[in-house]
Image (cartoon, rainbow, N blue to C red):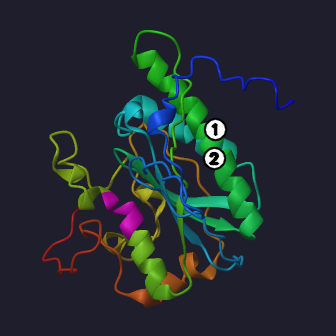
Amino acid sequence: MRPSEPEQLPLFAAPVDKRRRRKRRPGSKRPGPKPKGRAGSPHRLRPELKARHPVHVVLRVVGAVGSLRRRSTYKAVREATLTTARREDFRIVHLSIQRNHLHLLVEADHKGALASGMQGFQISAAKHLNAAISKDRPGPRRRGAVFPVRYHAEIIKTPTQARHALNYVINNWRKHREDRTEMTRTWKIDWFSTAIMFPGWEEYGDHPFLWRWPPTYDPLVVYQPRTWLFREGYKRGGPPISVREVPSTPRQPHADKPS
């Protein structure tokens, strides 16, 4: 632009009052945007992952999804586990569905497999959850984001960590008092999780078989663990896990066991 030509202002821009214009001091910066809402996991470089170390992953959903603990959204998450089960380098071992978040215990061959496996699970889950929500509500099909923030991942390296993670995930409903509703008071385990797939319940005793699920129930599709920590190691991290145990609270001895 030649110096003789007038400066062109952007369309719809407000007129500038040059009398009130202030010059910025050298080196000063404009204030950045204010942070919005709750932050997710910081965008730091993920640590390297060894195949022998499982991972505890937490995924939060947007409020527009509503509660995940209902039949339609359970089926949507189950479809995502079915899609993810086709992979060999990334395996979901346990999963717990809470009202506004998911807990996953996963095994991955390396850091890249964890990243791509979680990406595939989130894409599939978002697709099926949006479809499920659209059936329950009038209007056009929902196409917005489902998982607004980066997932949180904690690498498990010791038997104590492994036992804590297993108990935290499969008994998570007791932590959130979901076991006290009218519908769930008679439940022994959380049917919105893979608790039925866990073979190490204290209540099993010497019985080598699992409890049976209702005939109309379709369990979440997960792998049997391959890492030593989830197959045997967790047993060295503390006493057997009970169906009555509440995560993050001192474990109390049980006077009786449910039949």
Nearer to us in this view, 256 or 12: 12
Tell me: residue 83, above or below residue 203: above
At mark 2, the secondary structure is helix
Furthest-bottom residue in this view? 236
State yes or no: residue 171 in magenta: yes
Residue occupied by mark 2: 121
Stretch in magenta: 168-172
119 with respect to 17 (left or right): right
Q: Residue at x 63, y 38 (%)?
A: 124
Q: Residue at x 60, y 46 (%)?
A: 81
Residue occupied by mark 1: 124
Q: Are marks 2 and 1 in contact (CB under 8 Å)?
A: yes
155 with respect to 170 (left or right): right
Question: x, y percentage for residue 85?
Answer: 68, 50
73 with respect to 224 (left or right): left
The alpha-carbon separation of the residues under discs 2 and 1 comes to 5 Å
Q: Residue at x 56, y 84 (%)?
A: 157
Q: Quadrant location of the C terminus? A: bottom left
Identified by mark 2, the residue type is Phe
Identified by mark 1, the residue type is Ser
Q: Quadrant location of the N terminus? A: top right
Q: Is residue 20 visible?
A: yes
Nearer to us in this view, 121 or 225: 121
Count neighbours of disc 1 (C-alpha within 10 A) and say few if under 14, some if 14 to 19, many if 20 or more: many
Question: x, y percentage for residue 125?
Answer: 57, 39
